[in-house]
Each structure stands twice: as C-alpha cells, then as structure tokens.
Amino acid sequence: MSDAKISFRTGQGGLPLVRVETGESTADIYLQGAHVTHFQRHGEKPLLFMSRASVFEAGKPIRGGVPVILPWFGPREGKPPHGFARLHAWQLLEAGLSPTQGTRLRFRLPNVPEMQEWPRFVAEFIVDAGHALDLELKVTNVDDTRPLPLETCLHTYFAVGDIARTEVRGLRGARYLDNLDGLREKPETAEAISFSGEVDRVYVHTADTVEVVDRAWGRVISVAKAGSLSTVVWNPWIAKAQRMPDFGDDEYLRMVCVESGNVKTNAASLPPGQSATFAVTLDSREL
Ligand code: TA6
C-alpha cells in the first residue's frame, strides 16, 4: 500500500477534511463529526450517498455518508436528534497505514460543552480505507463513579441506482421496532425488504451481515459487523424527503440507510472504566 496518500483539504462550507487515496479507492472524512462523506473504489460507483442539499456548517449535521451517532439515537426532548457527537469537529490523532485496508485514521471527540451533562467519556473512531471501508467506534467510560447510558450508531447512507430496484437482505427472522407504528415490535418475515413507501425500522438483537442488492447498478453492498446488535433500515420516501430541507425531494430514489450500532433495546449502561466497541466492514461486489 505504499501508494497510499493522505492529504488535508478545505471542503464544502470551508470545513476541513482529510482525503485518503490508495491504489484501490478514494475516501473523504470531514473533521466535523469525523464524518466519512465519500468512499469510492476506482472505476466503480460511489458506495455512499451524499445529499446535494446537505449543509456544511460547524454545529450542523451533514446529510449523507456515515454520521457518527452518540451518546443517544433518535429524537430527545430539547436536544438535537441523534446526539451531539456529529455536531462537533473531532481531533485527528493518528494517520498512517493499516494492516487491513490501506490507510488508517484515528479520531477522538474532544471535550465539548455538552459533555458536562454526561458521565465523563472518551469516544474514538477509526477509519480504515482501502479495498473496503472498515469503521470502528469505541466509547470508554472514564467517569469515577457514574455508569454511562449509551447508544451508538453509524448511520450509513448507501448510494443506489434506483430504490425501486433495491432490496435489503439478511434480516429475516429478526425482530424490529417500527418507527412508523409507535416503535411496536414486529417480526421480520421477508427474505428481502423492498421499498414502496417510507421504511424506518430498528432491528434489535441481530449481529447478522446485511446486504443491499442494488440491481440498477448491478452490485451487492455488504454490511458486516462485530459487536453490534442493532441494524436500522430507513428510506424517507416522498413526504419525509419533502419535509427535510437538507435533502432533495427526489433523493429518496437513490439512497437507503442501513445503520449499525447498539440502540433502543440494545442500548448500553457502561460501568466506570469499561469500553464499548463495535466495528463494521462496508464492501461491495458485482451482482
Ligand atoms: O435512522 C433513521 C432515523 O432515525 C429516521 O427516523 C430519520 O429521522 C433519520 O434517522 C434521519 O435523522 P436526522 O436527525 O439525521 O435527520
């Protein structure tokens, strides 16, 4: 991997980003949220979806790529949805070669003001980009006495050629909380989940690999994970897409979220001194 190159650039909205170029792929990671906004193998379609309407401003979430979600998932009264980690610039602690993919970047969330309300914790995020995209999120409770209530999620937006020709496989037999039906728990009976309306499901107690079959672009995207028991599947469809100012009205046609982490029923209560780590490998192959 001696042809790996890491460079620092000014991205959209003047926000700093790290660009990783290897013999196989290119990746962009904004310091804001340690947010992977782009990963593309040479000669292939981009793996990740980015909204053309996304905001790129300090303190605002970026719409697309891999939002890093912690310490809570979903809405919270009087707080930003999906926690505060994605709203701040992370520090880049390490940049080098990786034994698996090619290049390895290690980011840490600095002590931001919102942390005052929480037991003291350290969050680190590792991005290994090469043939595939390996991501690892580690949170350590460094408080002396208090347990850390914690939800973590990599809220990954995948680019697809046509949502009408896309299906998600690997969740049959799992149970999900239906966010469109009061989070009622339901069994997944379908071998393949297809899309003809909004889908917003939190699958719990499942460690299984999930595949996105993207027939329009002739590929299968795989989401393999370790240490994660929750998988979220989301497409906003028409009405919700129109309600999101940082998302194009027609962009629901070309994306699907398959998110990995530990949320809702799989949330943790981390004792002092303990860490919670999970990892995902995002890859693709021809159909
Ligand atoms: O993960 C699915 C979800 O919780 C949806 O309900 C939708 O709100 C989506 O996340 C986007 O959340 P965001 O805060 O990024 O707009």
Image (cartoon, rainbow, N blue to C red):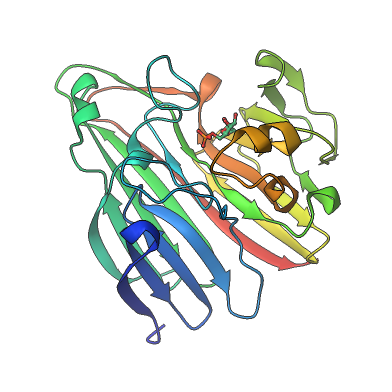
Is residue 209 something one can see in this rendering? no
Q: Position of residue 204 (x, y in %)?
A: 62, 27
Horizontally, residue 263 falls left or right of residue 157, namely: left
Horizontally, residue 135 falls left or right of residue 9, namely: right
Q: Quadrant of residue 287?
A: bottom right
Q: Which sits in the foreground, 153 or 102?
A: 153
Quick check: 188 above or below 193?
above
Quick check: 103 above or below 259?
below
Q: Position of residue 12 (x, y in %)?
A: 40, 61
Horizontally, residue 174 falls left or right of residue 229, namely: right
Q: Quadrant of residue 18?
A: bottom left
Residue at x 63% of width, y 44% of height: 257
Residue at x 43% of width, y 65% of height: 28
Q: Position of residue 98 (x, y in %)?
A: 37, 69
Q: Quadrant of residue 144?
A: top left
Horizontally, residue 202 falls left or right of residue 18, namely: right
